[in-house]
Image (cartoon, rainbow, N blue to C red):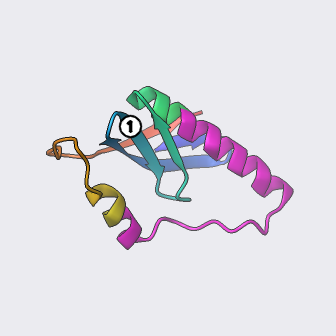
Amino acid sequence: MMQFRNGFFTFVLKKSGGYWVALCLENGLIGQGKTKDEAIFKLKEAIDSFEDARREDPEIYTAPVPINELHEFLSMPSDEPVPEYFELRAIHA
């Protein structure tokens, strides 16, 4: 979970190729970086930008990631060995 001005967000981290990808479960936004911290930072930036846009236009659509899309994200083929676990974290901004 990440804490923001408007509450907390939950995300999942996954290694894909030479990058880490962080997927926010509440809105489907993604951050990517060469390290876990960089991916999380990029996700924070994306969520902050998205929340700013939603304040200006509350009609902007947002929805949690559907379970089938989460399954696809977690099971996408990769050259990396499949880890024994996936990380679910909380962060705050």
Count of numbered labels shown in the rendering: 1
In the image, residue 77 lies in the stretch drawn in magenta: no
Query: Magenta stretch mostly in which secondary structure?
Result: helix
The reply, left or right, for residue 58 in relation to residue 22 is right
Check disc 1: other Cα within 10 Å, few if <14, some if 14-19, many if 20+: some
- Boundaries of the magenta span: 42-70
Spot occupied by residue 39 in the image (x, y as percentages of width and height): 47, 35
Relative image position of residue 38 (x, y in whole percent)? 48, 28
The residue under the point 56% across, 35% down is: 42
Q: Nearer the viewer, residue 74 or 25?
A: 74
| Above or below, comparing residue 33 to residue 66 in the picture | above
In the structure shown, which secondary structural element does the residue marked by tag 1 occupy?
Answer: strand
Residue 18 placement: quadrant: top left
Q: Quick one: 77 or 39, which is closer to the camera?
A: 77
Q: Residue 84 at x, y = what percent? A: 14, 45
Quadrant, the C terminus: top right
Residue 74 image-quadrant placement: bottom left
- The relative height of residue 86 versus residue 93 in the rendered view (above or below) is below
Residue at the image position 51 percent from the left and 42 percent from the top: 31
Q: Residue at x 17, y 43 (%)?
A: 83
Q: Is 51 left or right of 39, judged from the image as shown? A: right
On screen, residue 43 above or below 10: above
Task: Please check the rendered image and state whether residue 68 is part of the magenta-colored stretch, yes or no.
Answer: yes
Relative side of 22 to 17, left or right? right
Q: Amino acid at mark 1?
A: Trp
Q: Which residue in the protein does label 1 denote?
A: 20
Residue for point 68% across, 68% down: 61
